[in-house]
Amino acid sequence: MSILMGADDVRRAIARIAHEIVERDGDPTRIALVGIRSRGDLLATRLRAAVLANEGVQLPLGILDITLYRDDLTRVASAPIVRTTEIGFPVDDRIVVLVDDVLFTGRTIRAAMDALVDYGRPTAIRLAVLVDRGHRELPIRADHVGKNVPTQPRDDVRVHLREVDGRDEVELVTTEVPA
Amino acid sequence: MRWQRRHVLSTEDWSRDEIELVLEQATAMLEVLARPIRRTPALRGRTVVLFFAEASTRTRMSFELAAKSLSADTSIITASGSSVEKGETLYDTVRTLQALGAEIIVLRHSASGAPYFVAERVSASVINAGDGWHAHPTQGLLDALTLRGALGDLDGKRVAIVGDILHSRVARSDVHTLVPLGARVVLCGPPTLVPSAWRGGSVPDGVAYEPDVDRALADADAVIALRLQRERQEAGLLPSLREYRSTWGITEERAARLRPGVPILHPGPMNEGVEIDASVAHGPRSLVERQVTNGVAVRMALLYLLATAGAGTEQAGDAAASPASPAEVPA
């Protein structure tokens, strides 16, 4: 097991992404943040606070649960719990920044985009992630990345956030292939 | 907790955790029903057959909307206009439905126990949409969701159920759903329309029988009025509908004497002016419309849980998902 990011790394990554998001589109009043449960919602909340501190603009914030859009529901052994989605603003004509903790296969993001367009027609959908660990199975890439990390497919990237885990840390847990 | 059941036949043997899980999932489904596009792809390609061997409008429509909101394919079969009219047995009909690919069969039947008979003989999941006098589990769950929305935690709350208890599968399913959630149910109705054992005092835990409607209502936190089936009068169980209204009806006067904020529910269809006055049914205390919406959400939750549980053999969170949240997709 190794530490990929400590608390300061997480803090700096969020601060940088908060600047990048606004820089990219110039006009922060067109931007909305939507965090993907669970932990993407926490990161989105932090990004919103950072943008408010930097720009004085409170971005609309939504929380998305993608369970009903998963592509593996016919393959799981027991029903994953569906959590409530909370998107209390019209997404039409906004630049929606999806926020998640780890980008891996891309399947979560595919599901999130399908869910999001059921709420309306955003001008654009962008993607911000704390960690990109590679091994995409779909043609998806992130617009804003906290840290790129080379991993093996069998590895496990664990994001801990102080709101739920008591500390900010990203770990890489490697699994030995049995001989 | 993990959902384990293959059928929903009655909530009588359910744990509190199971009821809580369904209510939690139904709450998430309510948000889906409030979206501009009320449809998610969760049950795409799955087949739900609604087999209604007994008349129903709202329950059938509710299940149909629930299935469609999850993108399931639905077929509706009613007794009239199907081979049931030609004398086909229940067993043969459901075997045919299964052979045609039904994965979930929603069954309403006038015979108590019919869904159990079917569940034992098919590989499809069976949801009881009302069987005889026995059970109507989705009604019990939607009433619980509605009462939770109005009252919050049901622990210690007094729910008065007024009307024809004897013939009411709704009353039985309400008892079997509300009592595990901590509510105390007070049953109230004409002695001829209450099971004699319950009148005699041998009621289940958490349930009381109160013969005086005004006493039952005086300290109620919520009231559920039951539909009076008019044929009960012909059977000699009631003197007249007018007398029923004045003795047992939730009239405007009785509703006015309820404590402030006490909600009134009714499973529908209502006989306005018999068991409930029209002004009460459509008044500020009425949660009847809320019940209809909640009914769709509860049925979505059950269809989702049944269609997904045991569909495959992979663990819900495979090795790539974060162990802190085992039900997530690999990011």
Image: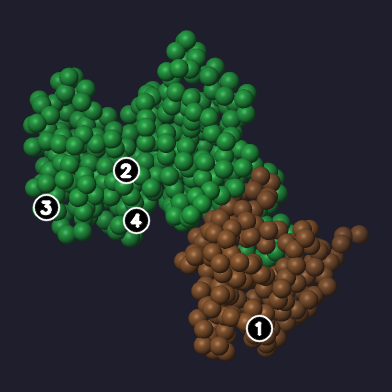
Disc 1 residue type (three-letter) = Glu
Report x, y in % for residue B207. 26, 45
Which chain letter goes with mark 3? Answer: B
Q: Quadrant of the N terminus of chain B?
A: bottom right
B18 or B42: nearer the viewer:
B42
Task: Give the spatial CA distance, label 2 vs label 1.
Answer: 59 Å
**Numbered circles on residues, count:** 4
**Parent chain of label 4:** B
**What distance separates the C-alpha of mark 3 from that of mark 1?**
61 Å
Would residue B292 be seen by someone viewing this image from the given angle? Answer: yes
- Specify the chain shown as brown: A
Task: Tell me the chain of label 2.
Answer: B
Residue that label 3 marks:
B256
Occupied quadrant, residue A137: bottom right
Disc 4 + disc 3, Cβ < 8 Å: no
Q: Residues within 10 Å of mark 2 (few under 14, many from 20)?
A: many
The dot on residue B307 is: none
Q: Identity of the amino acid at label 3?
A: Ala
- Mark 4 vs mark 3: same chain? yes
Residue B71: image quadrant is: top right
Disc 4 or disc 1, which is closer to the eye?
1
Find disc 1 in the rendering and name its residue: A23
- Left or right: B171, with B145 as reference point: left
Nearer to us: label 2 or label 1: 1
The residue carrying mark 2 is B175
Chain whose colour in the figure is green? B
Q: CA distance from mark 4 to mark 3?
A: 22 Å
Residue at 83% x, 73% y: name it.
Answer: A150
Identify the mark nearer the N-term, 4 or 3: 4
Q: Quadrant of the C terminus of chain B?
A: bottom right
Q: Single out the mark in the foreground, 4 or 2.
A: 4
Residue B14 at x, y = what percent? 44, 44
